[in-house]
Image: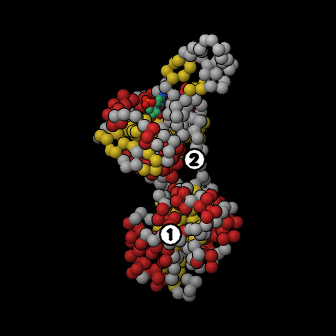
Amino acid sequence: MLAGKRILLIIGGGIAAFKSLDLIRRLREHGATVTPVLTKSAEEFVTPLSASALAAQKVYRDLFDLTDEAEMGHIELSRAADLVVVAPATADLMAKMAGGLANDLASTLLLATDKRVLIAPAMNVRMWEHPATQRNLGVLKEDGVLVVGPDEGDMACGEYGPGRMSEPLAIVAAVEDALVNGPLKGHHIVVTSGPTHEPIDPVRYIANRSSGAQGTAIARALSALGAKVSFITGPADVAPPDGVGVIKVQTAAQMADAVEAALPADAAVFAAAVADWRVKTASDKKMKKDGKSLPKLDFAENPDILAGVAQRKKNRPQLVVGFAAETDDVEANATAKRKRKGCDWIVANDVRPETGIMGGTENAVTLITKDGADAWPRLSKDQVAAKLAAKIAEALS
Ligand code: C5P
């Protein structure tokens, strides 16, 4: 099943484009959301209206459409998907991809995306067998592009041989292989994210600053590699990803209970910014200011969820990953934190306000393991998530 998965479908200009309309239907039947993109020549074979009606989505066609840019920029469009599918992938589109050209919307999206790309080639047999196309195919495979087909058979042009686009259901199976049967298939991973809110009274609370953006991106990236994800989130600014099990909590105590209930798991990633303290007894009525005395709040320490899971004897996940938000001596503090908490990895980040990381779209992290510290370059939070998910897949394999 492809429930919650988002496919950006680029339809190239070939006679096989008519099969792409059926592909949209099949992908949706399997639970995916499909956003179609038509090249200029694709519009000679299928209409934007049919693609849009079948996808129940807006169809994107033009790189310089200012309305589109105002609604969703082309970079964002290329990254908002879990997988980019090119069907049919014509000889021309394959050549553009192999050469890194970006002279229309389709080729620009393919160059800008940070997601995996699956192509379903379709062309005349001589064009397919031409050394130029085979050379381009080799380059694309080396770049990590996934390929389904082409099939052998009678072609619309009257010739016989390899060049027919794979049937829609075979393309759906390849999409499932890429997204659901990924390297984390069969693995259960718990991810905590967002802040916790510790009530003082019914209207006031104590919290840490956290948008939940990095934890959400990690849950999405793990799910894209095929993991079953239990996503336990406090009140975050960003919406939880589709296709994962979401458990919403408010307090640290609720988060600890939800983690306990979600175990056993193969790995656990604790990205939440859990409040360290709670008010011992929250007032059940709004506390009034009387203009004279200040309220006295008695604090209690919250359970350390990460340390608790990392140090347990029974049901300890094989891989326990914690986060460290530091403002100074990032590497030394995070290395000490890894030992103190008993976890396997710490993802450390520098959250001094001048870095703009807190609440921003980028992150500069250092991964601390038993083998030392690995400083990653400044990346988007999605890219950090993809890199971390790939490392987790490697560690669990
Ligand atoms: O000790 P500190 O809060 O800096 O540790 C951060 C790491 O510990 C994060 O991975 C966070 O999710 C986790 N943590 C937790 N429970 C707490 C406090 C922190 O799981 N009560």
Q: Residue furthest bottom?
A: 158
**How far across and down, in percent of the image, does residue 336 sit?**
33, 31
**How far across and down, in percent of the image, does residue 332 sit?**
32, 34
Q: How many marks?
A: 2
Closer to the observer: label 1 or label 2?
1
**How far across and down, in percent of the image, does residue 151 sit?**
51, 75
Q: Is residue 232 visible?
A: no
Residue 241 is tagged as 2
The vertical placement of 15 against 268, above or below, is below
Disc 1 under 8 Å from ligand 1? The reply is no
Seen from the viewer's position, the closer of residues 341 and 168 is 341
Q: Amino acid at mark 1?
A: Ser
Dot 1: within a 10 Å radius of its alpha carbon, few (fewer than 14), some, or many (20 or more) residues?
Answer: some
Q: Amino acid at mark 2?
A: Pro
Seen from the viewer's position, the closer of residues 301 and 70 is 70
Residue 53 is tagged as none
Seen from the viewer's position, the closer of residues 304 and 175 is 304
Residue drawn where x is 51% and y is 42% of the image: 359
**How far across and down, in percent of the image, does residue 263 sit?**
51, 35
Seen from the viewer's position, the closer of residues 289 and 100 is 289
Q: Which residue is mark 1?
A: 107
CA distance separating discs 1 and 2: 27 Å
Q: Quadrant of ligand 1?
A: top left
- Secondary structure, mark 1, is helix
In the rendered view, does 326 fall on the left or right side of 370?
right
- Secondary structure, mark 2, is loop
